[in-house]
Image: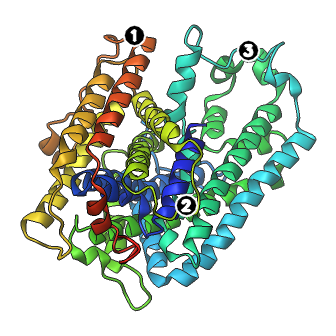
């Protein structure tokens, strides 16, 4: 529900401003350059980090193929090894970079084929498992046992949303927003793409989870004390394979070897295709940041095929940097989820502001009760960030320093002719918002996973951040669970009201949107 509400907010904004790199530009139009630069960098961070996430997924599946003789990709801590894992990840990112530079038309055709495959294979899995391996008793009663940690069912559910990849799996709708300016009829196509993608994706993922639960052997649950006892019942090797390649392992154990191999092929195509498209998305977001004047103008320079070459190369390089402090899939997912939701948090703020600043601009889709939905969406976004925990939030803020340095250098040396005057009116609430969420995360009930993982010998990160292996952990005990939730809600509503009160006036919005609506329509 959280992602659907945020997607509907983006559907209106995407139809209102059908521009390349949309999520990085909405707050720019609503609040000016300071807010736009801040939330635009969140947008860029999450997109740039997805490619290495999916590359790690490919390597993770590769490491568990039986008889492949692939070893040494991960060390005993479950992170990519410097001997084989990191070099392979670099090679795969380079391949994605090359494919992005070949041409947007070829990429679009490739993406269509990959998207079709990514939909058909999960549907096939659902059909096969429900038809041949269905065990209804796994869903409750009898030997099924509890799903959640005893005495903390609600907290477990909330904590799993960012940490287990639940939110991450539904973030694909943003691709329609980022590439909206390249559509033949963006005002018509954008809302349809945003809403359709989230509904189709959610339906497929729910059905896939149902199929997985139903296909597990009841004896595994009965002998292991329910869902929580599965780790103690399975051998270490089987448990590792079930975690790293769940459907392939399930099919192999269930005697469907042919299906297991299809899943293993899918394990390369699906995450590989996602890495390919998110590298495209990251380059378009940096293109949007440059168009707004935040980063050097070189990011918006394109080839004869309209490909932002430097933006693609820089996005790939930044993505590789994430592999240094986050060389595990779960650590990267938590950070990207938080960066994504921080980016999404700007959308309801922008919607609320633009509903008041420019109520008459043409909207191909108008969110019903948008004035009410917008603050609710902002609250939901901040709750997800809070559920990620202090470790994730602190690491995310550390990476914000890179953006501050890049934007600061661009402004200092005037590296972009579109460089705007910084709109400081938004600075007080933006800074209060970022610091406030950090304080709540630090003292709240979700300490989360450790922050930056720094391998021994990587002196660069130790020197810059003064780290040993992780950032300092949050307290996690000062604010009880339910009280901390209430604090986040109240804090979010106060920030929302403050932000709306400092929105840009109508004439200033006209000035900022002339690249979308030239005069006299903007007037």
Q: Which residue corresponds to the image point at 32% horizontal and 51% vertical from the top-left?
A: 39
Point out which mark residue 274 bears: 2
Task: Return the residue at label 3.
Answer: 145
Which quarter of the rendering shows the C terminus? Answer: bottom left
Farthest right residue in view: 131
Sequence order check: which comes first, mark 1 or mark 2? 2
Task: First in sequence, mark 2 or 3: give its number.
Answer: 3
Q: Residue 322, percent across and down?
A: 34, 52
Q: Which residue is mark 1?
A: 480
Residue 491 is situated, as x and y percent measured from the top left of the image, at: 34, 26
Q: Is residue 517 left or right of residue 167?
A: left
Q: Residue at x 27, y 70 (%)?
A: 290
Structural distance between the alpha carbons of marks 1 and 2: 38 Å
Observer-nearest of 371 and 328: 371
Numbered tag placed on residue 216 in the rendering: none
Give SS at disc 1: loop
Q: In the displayed structure, would residue 75 be above or below residue 408? A: above
Label 2 sits on a secondary structure element that is helix
């Amino acid at each position: 529900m959280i992602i659907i509400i945020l997607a509907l907010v983006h559907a209106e904004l995407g139809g209102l401003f059908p521009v390349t790199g949309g999520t990085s530009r909405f707050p720019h139009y609503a609040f000016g350059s300071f807010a736009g630069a801040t939330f635009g960098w969140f947008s860029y961070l999450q997109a740039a980090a997805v490619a290495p996430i999916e590359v790690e997924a490919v390597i993770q599946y590769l490491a568990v193929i039986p008889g492949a003789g692939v070893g040494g990709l991960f060390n005993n801590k479950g992170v990519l090894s410097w001997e084989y894992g990191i070099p392979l990840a670099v090679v795969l990112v380079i391949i994605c970079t090359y494919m992005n530079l070949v041409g947007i038309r070829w990429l679009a055709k490739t993406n269509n084929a990959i998207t079709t495959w990514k939909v058909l294979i999960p549907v096939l899995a659902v059909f096969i498992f429900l038809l041949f391996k269905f065990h209804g008793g796994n869903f409750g009663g009898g030997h099924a046992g509890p799903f959640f940690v005893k005495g903390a069912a609600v907290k477990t559910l909330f904590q799993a949303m960012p940490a287990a990849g639940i939110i991450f799996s539904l973030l694909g709708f943003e691709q329609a927003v980022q590439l909206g300016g390249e559509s033949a009829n963006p005002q018509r196509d954008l809302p349809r793409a945003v809403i359709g993608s989230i509904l189709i994706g959610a339906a497929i993922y729910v059905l896939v989870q149902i199929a997985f639960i139903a296909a597990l052997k009841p004896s595994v649950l009965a002998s292991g004390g329910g869902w929580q006892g599965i780790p103690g019942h399975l051998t270490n090797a089987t448990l590792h394979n079930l975690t790293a390649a769940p459907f392939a392992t399930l099919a192999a154990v269930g005697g469907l070897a042919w299906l297991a191999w299809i899943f293993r092929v899918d394990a390369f195509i699906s995450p590989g295709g996602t890495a390919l498209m998110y590298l495209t998305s990251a380059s378009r977001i940096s293109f949007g940041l440059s168009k707004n004047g935040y980063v050097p103008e070189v990011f918006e320079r394109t080839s004869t095929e309209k490909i932002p070459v430097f933006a693609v190369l820089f996005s790939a390089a930044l993505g590789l940097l994430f592999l240094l402090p986050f060389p595990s899939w779960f650590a990267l997912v938590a950070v990207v989820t938080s960066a994504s939701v921080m980016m999404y948090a700007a959308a309801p703020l922008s919607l609320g502001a633009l509903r008041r600043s420019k109520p008459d601009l043409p909207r191909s889709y108008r969110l019903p009760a948008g004035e009410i939905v917008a603050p609710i969406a902002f609250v939901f976004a901040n709750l997800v960030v809070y559920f990620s925990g202090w470790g994730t939030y602190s690491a995310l803020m550390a990476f914000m320093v890179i953006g501050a340095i890049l934007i600061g250098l661009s402004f200092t040396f005037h590296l972009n002719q579109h460089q705007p005057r910084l709109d400081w009116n938004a600075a007080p609430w933006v800074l209060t918002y970022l610091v406030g969420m950090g304080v709540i995360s630090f003292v709240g009930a979700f300490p989360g996973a450790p922050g930056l993982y720094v391998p021994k010998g990587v002196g660069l990160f130790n020197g810059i951040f003064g780290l040993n292996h992780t950032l300092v952990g949050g307290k996690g005990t000062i604010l009880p669970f339910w009280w901390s939730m209430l604090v986040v809600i109240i804090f979010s509503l106060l920030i929302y009201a403050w932000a709306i009160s400092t929105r840009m006036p109508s004439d200033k919005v006209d000035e900022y949107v002339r690249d979308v609506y030239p005069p006299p329509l903007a007037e």
